[in-house]
Image (cartoon, rainbow, N blue to C red):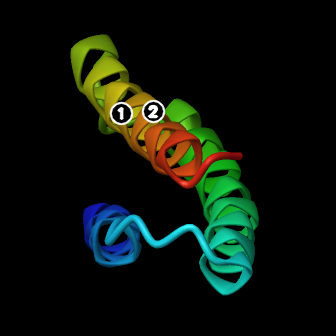
Amino acid sequence: MRKLASIGVALVVLLCSACTCTAERKAVDRLGEQQEKLWTKYAFYVASDPRLDEAAKNDELKLLDSLRSLLASLRESLGD
């Protein structure tokens, strides 16, 4: 799942070229919608994984919060 999160970050960074045209805004919105679906599933997976202790679960959830923050910053930079 970390690979999946890393791919999401890579896509956000690639789109972060800060062009404010409509195509980029729509792409970022679509990426956000797709990532939110994945993040919801991943958060459920993390919460229910008995192999992870509370510290590991918190680390994984912090990663999701960091990705959400990055996407929000990208949206803000595009003027949304």
Q: Secondary structure at mark 1?
A: helix
Q: Cβ–Cβ below 8 Å for labels 2 and 1? A: yes
Mark 2 belongs to which amino acid? Ser
Answer few, some or many: residues within 10 Å of disc 1's Cα (few below 14, many 20 plus, some between 14 and 19). Answer: few
Q: Is residue 64 left or right of residue 66?
A: right
Pick the quarter of the image with the N terminus: bottom left
Q: Position of residue 45 (x, y in %)?
A: 56, 48
Q: Position of residue 39 (x, y in %)?
A: 59, 51
Q: Quadrant of residue 52?
A: top left
Measured in 3D between alpha carbons, the distance from the residue under mark 2 to the one under mark 1, in whole angstroms, is: 5 Å
Q: Residue at x 36, y 33 (%)?
A: 66
Q: Which residue is mark 1?
A: 66
Answer few, some or many: residues within 10 Å of disc 2's Cα (few below 14, many 20 plus, some between 14 and 19). Answer: few
Mark 1 belongs to which amino acid? Ser
Q: Nearer the viewer, mark 2 or mark 1?
A: 2
- Of residues 18 and 57, which is closer to you in this image? 18
Q: Which residue is mark 2?
A: 69
Identity of the residue furthest to the bottom in this view: 23
Q: Residue at x 45, y 33 (%)?
A: 69
Q: Position of residue 67 (x, y in %)?
A: 41, 44
Give the answer, above or below, for where 12 lies relative to 57: below
Identity of the residue furthest to the top in this view: 54
Q: Is residue 64 left or right of residue 25?
A: left
Q: Position of residue 68 (x, y in %)?
A: 51, 39
- Of residues 78 and 29, which is closer to you in this image? 78
Say which mark, if any, is on residue 31: none
Q: Residue at x 32, y 63 (%)?
A: 9
Q: Residue at x 68, y 86 (%)?
A: 23
